[in-house]
Image (cartoon, grey):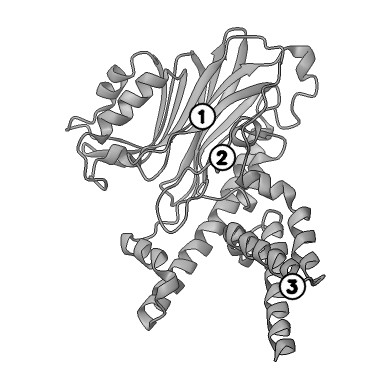
Amino acid sequence: MRTLFRNIFLIINLVLALSLLMSYLAAFVSPEILWIFAFFGLAYPYILLANLCFVVFWIFFRKWYFLLSLVLILAGWGSLKKLLQLKPKKEPVEVAADPFRLISYNVRLFNYYLWEKDTALRQKMMDYLHNESPAVICFQEFLTLPKANFTLAGLKKELNYLPYSHVNYTHRIPGRLNFGLATFSKYPIIHKGNIDYENSLNGIIYSDLVIAQDTVRVYNCHLQSVKLKQDYNQVLDSLIFNYDEKHLRDVKAISVRLRDAYIKRAYQAELLSRHIMTSPYPVIVCGDFNDTPFSYCYYRLSRGLKDGFIASGYGMGTTYRQNFAPIRIDYILYSPSLKSSHYFSKKTDWSDHYPVQCDFTFLRKEDASGQHSRR
């Protein structure tokens, strides 16, 4: 009987070890080619935890089988760093200019439809932005209502310490509603552009900012949303305890939506990655990617760039607070010719996303000689 149970646990361990390997491969296999890997990438934290449990389990029973999971966990050390960071060490670096702060924030339409039952949330968002004194703010799910008190002119007045702006609406109902992205800047914007995706409310804008003697291109991104229905969140929250036919149908519907979104994001990430390659300036790529750090989307966009969380953040780095688990889907990536510090994600209940912020300085030319193959 002991042999039977040992073999059962060993088979389960092998399946989990294989799943961990597939979660690593998710970063390198485009969902446009084979989408199943994306689901293993999404489940990486849970697969990792299960493998850790088996390491402890086999060590307790003094079996060499613990090596099955341990070797794979160590092989994926780079993935673990995307999930968890200890408090960063302070490194003295020669810089060329005073630091500037960037905040990226999916504001969920400024809570206009009162998903969170607090009518003061919009004002709390604005107070937070004032207190942090950013030089650049990138909004996703930005909303203005021409005939109400949510006008662009009114918002510009509230953010008058950021006199330059770049606003692009991906969806408009003339005279009633405007939805899209917006970048507000303390620094002059000398060029503006956008990358629109066909049949999508999502999109990307980029703005070239002149900061002292330097220029940086800021990409404000909102990649393909999953568009889960509100009641699907309850399905995900209670998935462990419910297996009736209705829940299984809902799980299938969620899986289809996730699959379709993964495929669209892979295409969008490819377009954006190629566009970044053409930038004549160092870049900051920020926004809501709607994907985890273990995804193909993140891998494509972070190649040749640094991740603000990995370079100067600490803790779990959670940026999205809905559904069954805390995850990081909002990012600030940047060229190696910049230096980041004080990356921080403020835990609030104002939106379903947390605002993320990071301070930047330009490195001196001699320190950035390897500047960026990706600018």
Residue under the image location 69 percent in, 69 percent down:
57
- Tell me if label 2 and label 3 are in contact, CB under 8 Å: no
Residue under the image location 23 percent in, 45 percent down:
113
Residue 315 - label: 2
Query: What residue would you read off at disc 3?
Result: 61
Residue 166 - label: none
Q: Secondary structure at mark 1?
A: strand
Describe residue 44's horizontal placement relative to residue 108 as left or right: right
Query: What residue would you read off at disc 1?
Result: 193
Residue 142 x, y percent position in the rendering: 35, 36
Neighbours of disc 2 within 10 Å: few (<14), some (14-19), many (20+) = some
Measure the C-alpha gap from mark 2 to mark 1: 35 Å
Neighbours of disc 1 within 10 Å: few (<14), some (14-19), many (20+) = few
- For this orientation, the residue located farthest to the bottom is 1
Which quadrant of the structure image shows residue 19?
bottom right
Q: Secondary structure at mark 3?
A: loop
Describe residue 258's horizontal placement relative to residue 91 as left or right: left
Measure the C-alpha gap from mark 2 to mark 3: 32 Å
Describe residue 74's horizontal placement relative to residue 177 as left or right: right
Residue depth check, mark 2 versus mark 1: number of the one nearer the observer? 2
Q: Is residue 85 visible?
A: yes
Viewer-side residue, 232 vs 151? 232
Q: Secondary structure at mark 2?
A: loop
Looking at the image, is 176 positioned above or below residue 190? below
| Sequence-wise first label, 2 or 1 | 1
The residue type indicated by label 1 comes to Gly
Looking at the image, is 55 positioned above or below residue 336? below
Residue depth check, mark 2 versus mark 3: number of the one nearer the observer? 3
